[in-house]
Image: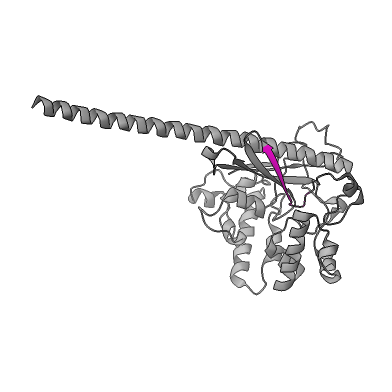
Amino acid sequence: MALVVVMGITAVAAVMAAHVMLLSETVAEEALVASERQRLRYQAESAADRAFWLLLVDRRLYPDRTLGTASQTRDERLTEPWMLDGRTHAFALDGSACQVMLRQTPQGINFAGSQPGQELRDQIDPEDTESRQAVETFLDIAADYVDPDDQTHLHGMEREDYAAAGWPGLPRNAPLQFLGEICWLPGLRDVLDMPPPPGWSEGQLLREVQAIPPIGISTPTRQGGSALPPFFSCSAGTIQQRGSFDAVELSRVLAARTAWQQQGVPLDLSLDADLLGRVRSRFSLDESTAVTVDVDAVAASPTRGGLTCRCQVTRPLDVRRPDAFSDKARQAWALWSRQWE
């Protein structure tokens, strides 16, 4: 009897010891993963800042910022180009590999100011009655959110409507100050044609909507004041719609854009005169006065393989504007947006 009791106690003790060992190993692994993710976060932030300053240096050395064209001065110096053309740059930073891409910020729908989202009307097929009604409803809601009065638009919402929906304290009754505010507006995903959660993320949102600058800072523009969409930052759907390209023409245009981003092949060598003329007349090839930096940091350690950290930063770029170094509000060099995934 005593032997049975001893063997039972020993078995229970062995199971408990194994459980404690497994638990401690799990906790240690979770701690290592958390530490590695935090390190990748710092690496991504460092890569974003480094890419920003390399871009400033490139703009100082090469004043011609026309995208998609050859530069004899740049070819003679054989330096890596840092431009807002969506090409990928690689950094190796202390045990991690970072992929950096620079994009133009004035892209997507503009929700800043007193008339947010008006471009949505231009993107809807006039014969698509359902989509047009959804856009009109959403624009009424957006207009009520930013206007200072309590008068409700036809399909809008004011304070009592938000309170009834469980959102007390809304609307702002002033222009949006933060990009995330538009997530509170009903119908946003429908008009942007985005999947429902969990497929919808803030990173996707930033690609569909323009960044909102701080108070007192104007919305970014492109050199020359062009209002055309940026060719190297537009989606394939926008390029096809704005350029009126058929499927074959679209594939050739996208291939030319990829050739420039990956191999530096000028657009005039990849496209015929007709397609190149349509690209130049319907899209902007000039850089903007603000930049969005996309960074993907990947752990290089074999034991931590697969861990990634994505950072997306939007900030001003024009050092020649009057308030660049003298604004009293200290917003001239503020980060307009920073997203983590």
| Rendered image quadrant of residue 19 | top left
Q: Position of residue 191 (x, y in %)?
A: 61, 61
Q: Is residue 315 visible?
A: yes
Q: Position of residue 203 (x, y in %)?
A: 61, 49
**What residue is shown at x 77% (from left), y 55% (from top)?**
263
Q: Is residue 121 visible?
A: no
| Rendered image quadrant of residue 151 | bottom right
Residue 269 part of the magenta segment: no
Question: Can you say which quadrant of the picture contains the N terminus?
Answer: top left
**What residue is shown at x 31% (from left), y 32% (from top)?**
18
Q: Position of residue 156 (x, y in %)?
A: 59, 57
Q: Which residues are magenta?
A: 84-92
Q: Is residue 128 above or below residue 196?
A: below
Q: Relative to the observer, which residue lies in front, 257 or 111?
A: 257
Residue 89 part of the magenta segment: yes
On screen, residue 326 versus residue 103, left or right, reads: right
Q: Relative to the observer, which residue lies in front, 233 or 320?
A: 233
Q: Is residue 331 above or below residue 143?
A: above
**What residue is shown at x 76% (from left), y 68% (from top)?**
243
Q: Relative to the observer, which residue lies in front, 193 or 280?
A: 280
On screen, residue 245 versus residue 95, left or right, reads: right
- The image shows a total of numbered marks equal to 0
Q: Position of residue 58 (x, y in %)?
A: 84, 42
